[in-house]
């Protein structure tokens, strides 16, 4: 499933956020979006999902204009992992994940045994199978976020948009989610995710887009885009980027001695 945005302007009524954004995500590709808080990443994602109408430009899914697709068809093509959120209703973890299967049923059908099997598999794959019957309002923020990631996986869409999926996770679970992202991409699923951690982009991204004030200021391979100079200009922090002996690239800030 190929997602394309062409000269996109986006925002809220009476409050434009960004313009001139063009990007594409191909099957099996991981594009990582980086930029400071308030630069428009979440609003851009909501527009790419059809939750907000574009203020200009065009969005297409496999050549079909997003504006002309019904919500059920969009849900079959694109899954969404929002930023970490508090649980409101006392659903069990597996009930939340099964909701991801809604796009594959009819309006009045309930979840099938196969839907529940797929949901349980998604929980197990993320190492949280023990949470199956737990009330999500009683889970930690990180556990809830893993449940939401499992819901997107169970949706079985060919494209997943993830808004800071690792933000509330501990170090170990960040690794679990990043590994799962690579596995999904290896299966041909396209991934668009945002993060504040350049190391995550170096670890999983095939391409990155760097945002500032609602615009994409650079896009391309991680090593080409995420340079010390650009990261300093965007985040106001001096960094060192190094390649380790095993081939991994890491980014660390240069702390000011006091």
Image (cartoon, rainbow, N blue to C red):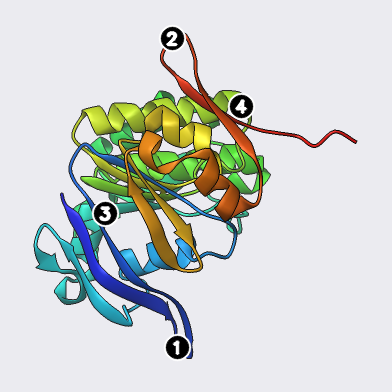
Which is more N-terminal, label 2 or label 1? 1
Q: Which residue is mark 3?
A: 78
- Expressed as whole percent of the image width and height from the top left, the position of residue 228 reads 54, 39
Residue at 54%, 30% (x, y): give it.
Answer: 174
Q: Which residue is mark 4?
A: 171
Query: Farthest bottom residue?
Result: 14
Q: Which residue is mark 2?
A: 246
Which is more N-terminal, label 1 or label 4? 1
Task: Kindly report the distance in space between the C-alpha atoms of the residues bearing marks 4 and 1.
Answer: 38 Å
Q: Nearer the viewer, residue 53 or 248?
A: 248
Is 242 displayed left or right of 168 in the figure?
left
Question: In the image, is residue 123 above or below residue 247?
Answer: below
Marks 3, 4: nearer the viewer = 4
- Expressed as whole percent of the image width and height from the top left, the position of residue 46 reads 39, 66
Residue at 36%, 33% (x, y): give it.
Answer: 181
Q: Can residue 126 be seen?
A: no
Question: In the image, is residue 214 above or below residue 35?
Answer: below
Q: Say if mark 3 contacts mark 4, CB within 8 Å.
A: no
Which is more N-terminal, label 4 or label 3? 3
* Quarter of the rendering containing residue 247: top left
Task: Kindly report the distance in space between the C-alpha atoms of the residues bearing marks 3 and 1.
Answer: 25 Å
Marks 4, 2: nearer the viewer = 2
Q: Nearer the viewer, residue 180 or 220?
A: 220
Residue at 43%, 9% (x, y): give it.
Answer: 246
- Expressed as whole percent of the image width and height from the top left, the position of residue 117 reads 30, 32
Residue 13 numbered mark, or none: 1
Residue 230 numbered mark, or none: none
Marks 3, 1: nearer the viewer = 1
Task: Kindly report the distance in space between the C-alpha atoms of the residues bearing marks 2 and 3.
Answer: 34 Å
Q: Say if mark 2 contacts mark 3, CB within 8 Å.
A: no
Q: Nearer the viewer, residue 2 or 148?
A: 2
């Amino acid at each position: 499933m190929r997602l394309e945005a062409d000269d996109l302007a986006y925002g809220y009524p009476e409050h434009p956020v960004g313009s001139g954004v063009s990007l594409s995500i191909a099957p099996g590709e991981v594009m990582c979006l980086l930029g400071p808080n308030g630069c428009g990443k979440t609003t851009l994602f909501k527009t790419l999902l059809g939750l907000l109408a574009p203020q200009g430009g065009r969005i297409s899914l496999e050549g079909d204009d997003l504006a002309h697709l019904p919500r059920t068809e969009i849900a079959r093509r694109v899954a969404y992992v929002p930023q970490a959120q508090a649980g409101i209703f006392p659903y069990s973890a597996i009930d939340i994940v099964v909701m991801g299967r809604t796009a594959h049923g009819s309006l009045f059908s309930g979840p099938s045994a196969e839907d529940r099997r797929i949901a349980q598999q998604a929980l197990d794959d993320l190492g949280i199978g023990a949470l199956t019957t737990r009330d999500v309002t009683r889970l930690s923020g990180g556990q809830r976020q893993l449940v939401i990631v499992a819901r997107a996986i169970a949706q079985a869409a060919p494209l997943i948009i993830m808004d800071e999926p690792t933000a509330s996770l501990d170090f170990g679970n960040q690794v679990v989610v990043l590994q799962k992202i690579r596995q999904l991409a290896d299966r041909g699923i396209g991934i668009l995710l945002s993060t504040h951690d350049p190391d995550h982009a170096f670890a999983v991204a095939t391409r990155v887009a760097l945002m500032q004030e609602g615009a994409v200021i650079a896009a391309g391979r991680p090593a080409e885009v995420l340079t010390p100079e650009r990261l300093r200009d965007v985040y106001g922090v001096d960094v060192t980027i190094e390649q380790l002996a095993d081939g991994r690239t890491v980014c660390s800030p240069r702390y000011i001695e006091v």
